[in-house]
Amino acid sequence: MGLKLARTKELDAVIGQNIRNIRTRGGITQESLGVSLGITFQQIQKYEKGTNRVSAAALIHFRNALGCELKDFFAGIDIDSAKNTTPTLSDEAVKVSMVVNAMPPWKQSLVLALTRQVDKIDKDSGK
């Protein structure tokens, strides 16, 4: 597992633990929270364990259901050290991504294979 992926999973686990702490402090069960959010208690468990990532939209729903602030979900996370955990794409990379995203999956696979071969050529030639 790459360092960035490991860090992302660590952040997911902290956010999940914070959801659990806020929920239990409020005396709310996983089942009742799930009903409030329209999801199963099993999904709540997965969020709280960090197994499943909580989307930004879901955090807003959690905030409303738990009566807390959004910042409460990030307690214990050093935001400064969490910066730049995802790569920054150049404008050209974003344009390429948009074109590739519009292609059918079989073409996307071909573009990926070609890109890897070009990258390998550069690495092999020392560029």
Image (tube, rainbow, N blue to C red):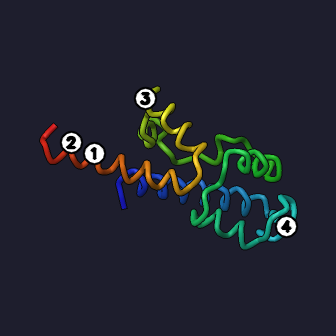
Q: Which quadrant holds the N terminus?
A: bottom left
Name the outermost residue toward the left. 126
Q: Which quadrant holds the C terminus?
A: top left
Instruction: Report the residue marked by disc 4.
Output: 32
Name the outermost residue toward the bottom. 42
Which of the two labelled residues, at mark 4 and mark 3, occupies the earlier sequence position?
4
Q: Real-space Cα distance between discs 2 and 1?
A: 5 Å
Name the kind of residue labelled 4 in the image: Ser
Name the kind of residue labelled 3 in the image: Ser
Instruction: Report the residue marked by disc 3.
Output: 90
Do the numbered discs 2 and 1 sit on residues whose CB atoms are within 8 Å? yes
Query: Element type at marker 3?
Result: loop
Q: Residue at x 45, y 42 (%)?
A: 86
- 10 Å crowding of disc 1: few (<14), some (14-19), many (20+): few
Compared to residue 1, the image places residue 77 above or below, namely above
- 10 Å crowding of disc 3: few (<14), some (14-19), many (20+): few
Q: Real-space Cα distance between discs 3 and 2?
A: 19 Å
Residue 114 in percent (x, y) is at 36, 49
**Foreground residue among 5 and 50:** 5
Instruction: Report the residue marked by disc 1.
Output: 119
Residue 50 in percent (x, y) is at 57, 63
Which of the two labelled residues, at mark 3 and mark 2, occupies the earlier sequence position?
3
Compared to residue 57, the image places residue 28 above or below, namely below
Do the numbered discs 3 and 2 sit on residues whose CB atoms are within 8 Å? no
Query: Element type at marker 2?
Result: helix
